Image: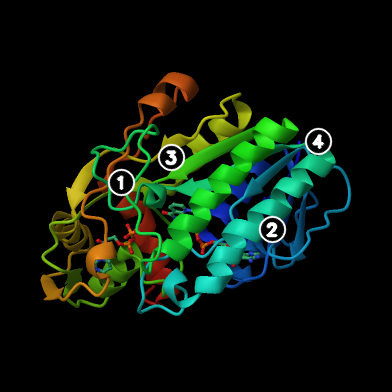
Amino acid sequence: MRIFITGAAGFLGSHLCDRLLAEDHEVVGMDNFITGSPDNLTHLANNQKFTFIRHDVSNFIFVPGKIDAVLHFASPASPNPNSPYGYVNLPIQTMKAGALGTHNSLGVARAHGARFLLASTSEIYGDPLEHPQKESYWGHVDPIGTRSVYDEAKRFAEALTMAYHRFHGIDTRIVRIFNTYGPRMHLDDGRVVPNFLQQANQGEPLTIYGDGSQTRSFCYVDDLVDGIIKLLYSNEHQPVNIGNPVESTILEFAHTINSLVGNMAGVSFKPNQRGEGDPQRRQPDITRARDVLGWEPRISLEEGIKRTIPYFKRRMNLV
Ligand code: NAD
Ligand code: UDP
């Protein structure tokens, strides 16, 4: 296939480019580098099967040549209000990427008769009242909270994707991605994995927001990419959760990171600046992914973190 992917210079987008090229597809990547980096794609500079277009997906998208599949991944993705890359500090751009960017990307799929895959998120469940979260759960989102610029844009994106599927007959897929980590995460985007790995590598205490009792379920990027590729090749039009169901509190997670890095500085507690918008529990129910895609994660948290540490050390000039 010739596959068009938005957000190609980001963490997940660049891994998807690598995987699709390894499967012998041609890839056309698009990005405006608002939160991603050309560094994530430099290794593809001489790859004849890869083309890159610098462009903001909020504006009309033109892709020359035929396209068989469109993967829409362009969007800021970090909720951290202290990071310049956090969507709270890019609120209008985030809403435009989720709304106009999804509309334009669906337009590309329609014009080319291509299949379409939307990168949605566990955030559409908000601060969930149902646990673990199944795809049938409608969510608990504050429509005007600080996170709403991301959550509501993604909810709109899902609705628009289903409208194109039902009204225009576009062959669509929706992946609801749960917390994913691995090499090429932005060091300064303020998400918990980059923060903790940098603090641990510098021998500093890991900053726990609140009391650390909030939970997350972390998926290694290679597992996530496997799930997305399986979904792309499937005929499933309903949303599918892809994530690792092994849940831990943020405090337990901090201890795991400290022990894997060998950091003796422990943790420090900070007031949770994300306030009430910070989801208290998050764990995917992956029954649908298991049943429909035959997918489940294979890489344990310990193994995934061990694979991620060298990237952070290299980017921090520690090796
Ligand atoms: P990222 O910030 O590393 O990548 C996003 C990429 O999109 C960046 O390269 C950025 O420059 C680009 N982009 C943003 N707005 C754009 C625009 N208007 N035009 C062109 N390019 C634009 O984040 P990520 O973690 O790789 O996330 C990728 C996608 O996956 C996002 O849609 C995000 O919502 C979704 N997602 C990620 C996670 C996760 O845990 N990483 C979880 C749920 C959903
Ligand atoms: N968190 C933390 N310390 C940090 C960064 C994040 O305790 O330095 C917490 C944050 O409050 C949240 C969880 O870790 O409860 C996961 O945050 P992340 O930014 O990775 O993304 P989220 O899962 O909230 O989308």
Query: Which of the two labelled residues, at mark 4 and mark 1, occupies the earlier sequence position?
Result: 4
Q: Label 3 neighbourhood size at 10 Å, few (<14), some (14-19), many (20+)?
A: many
Instruction: Say which element carries label 2.
Output: helix
Q: Which residue position holds label 3?
A: 223
Disc 4 residue type (three-letter): Gly
Q: Residues within 10 Å of mark 2 (few under 14, many from 20)?
A: some
Helix, strand or loop at mark 4: loop
Q: Nearer the viewer, residue 264 or 185?
A: 185
Q: CA distance from mark 2 to mark 1?
A: 27 Å
Q: Is residue 303 above or below residue 182?
A: above
Of labels 2 and 1, earlier in sequence is: 2
Quadrant position of residue 210: bottom left
Residue 274 image offset from top left, x and y in percent: 27, 70
Disc 1 versus disc 3: nearer the observer: 3
Query: In the rendered structure, are the residues bearing label 4 and label 2 in contact, judged by CB atoms less than 8 Å apart?
Result: no
Mark 3 and mark 2 in contact (Cβ < 8 Å)? no
What secondary structure is found at the residue carrying circle 3?
helix
> Can you give x and y, in whole percent of width and height, for residue 66 in the image?
86, 42
Q: Which residue is mark 4?
A: 113
Cα gap from disc 1 to disc 3, whole angstroms: 12 Å
CA gap between label 2 and label 3 equals 22 Å
